[in-house]
Image (cartoon, rainbow, N blue to C red):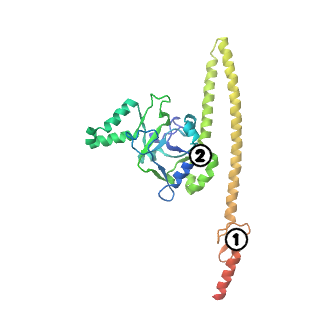
Amino acid sequence: MRTFDIGPTIKPDMSNYLIHMTDKKSLYNILEEGGSVNCGLIKSYIPKGANSESFEHKITCFTESPIYALGAFMKISSRRKSEQMQFGIGFKKNFMVNKGVRPTIYIDWPTLTNLLSLKNSEKMQDKNKVSDLLDHLSSLAHPLGENYQRQGFSWEREWRFVNEIGFEFNYDDIGLICCPESEKAILKVILGDFASDIVFIDTSHKYNVHSQLIIHSEEMDKIKNGLDLLEDEEIDGFLEDFDEYIEQLNEYKEYLVSLTEDISSLEKQIEEFKEWRVDIKANTAEYCGHYSQTLINHHLFGTVCPNCYDGLQYAYEKFVQED
């Protein structure tokens, strides 16, 4: 199997997508700002906090985090949470590599400083090949953040596309869209027929489910380890933890029941949409395109709505008389 095709079902910490996470308004802008019909554009920018003297590259950022882990972006980053960055657009990793998207290089600060100073040195600028190579490396470089309190952003697993304008794409390049369930319908309208080949993911829901599974797995490990304890005091503590775990399981059970109810509700909505579509198709006039449940069939022009029929019939009869 090729590396860029490896997904989380084979290696749980891998993803075969690269995803640009953003907010609701920005996602709609991305889909509407392409240079032509059925095209989009993720605009490039110089990262916030970058030193403009040492980093002048405009980039577009993506993450290779697995889909189930994308909800962590708002959990870890208060800025992303306040901006409600639960939306995103993703593309197959193989496609992105062919487009020139590359993984960010997280480098400790001393090494990064040396790289940037070497790039800007007059001696190196005389040697074009070396200068171009260093310029390319610096466009992908990001501080590891080992000396900062929050220890940087390597958890983002970032990839970059270096371009003055941004990352342009066709709708049929899109592999997935991240959005709450409530936004799916309108996004499908915007994407039209292309939506049928796109996976729509509620990343917050996916993250919560996966996190609960990990918590339960860890609790099971505690229980197994607790069975080997011999000290009375430790056993008492274990039993208290066990009671808490049972309570958590009950809460998780209630959560799963609510999901079942949500599924039933969605299935009902889908059936209603199907019926609505059939009704619209059956009651849309062939001649004027108007909707009416009392269409009139004209022997020459097909079905016509009542509002347009009288005018059409008058014009037709007048034409016949003049002819």
| Residue occupying image coordinates x 50% and y 34% | 155
| Residue occupying image coordinates x 64% and y 84% | 319
Relative to 319, is 278 above or below? above
- The answer to whether residue 244 of the structure is visible from this angle is yes
**Helix, strand or loop at mark 1:** loop
Number of marks in the rendered image: 2
The quarter of the displayed image where residue 321 is located: bottom right
Q: Position of residue 145 (x, y in %)?
A: 45, 31
**Badge 1 is on which residue?**
305
Task: Give the amino acid type for the residue marked by disc 2 in the picture.
Answer: Cys
**Helix, strand or loop at mark 2:** loop
| Residue occupying image coordinates x 62% and y 45% | 180
In the rendered structure, the answer to whether residue 114 lies left or right of residue 272 reads left
In the rendered structure, the answer to whether residue 268 lies left or right of residue 164 reads right
Relative to 260, is 187 above or below? below
Residue that sits furthest to the bottom in the current view: 322
Front one among 18 and 47 = 47
Check disc 1: other Cα within 10 Å, few if <14, some if 14-19, many if 20+: many
In the rendered structure, the answer to whether residue 105 lies left or right of residue 297 reads left
Which image quarter holds the C terminus? bottom right
Front one among 170 and 14 = 170
In the rendered structure, the answer to whether residue 90 lies left or right of residue 103 reads right
Task: Give the amino acid type for the residue marked by disc 1 in the picture.
Answer: Cys
Q: Position of residue 206 (x, y in %)?
A: 60, 39
Tell me if label 1 and label 2 are in contact, CB under 8 Å: no
- The answer to whether residue 70 of the structure is visible from this angle is no
Q: Position of residue 93 (x, y in %)?
A: 47, 44
**Badge 2 is on which residue?**
179
Residue that sits furthest to the top in the current view: 231
Check disc 2: other Cα within 10 Å, few if <14, some if 14-19, many if 20+: many
Front one among 234 and 80 = 80
The quarter of the displayed image where residue 84 is located: top right
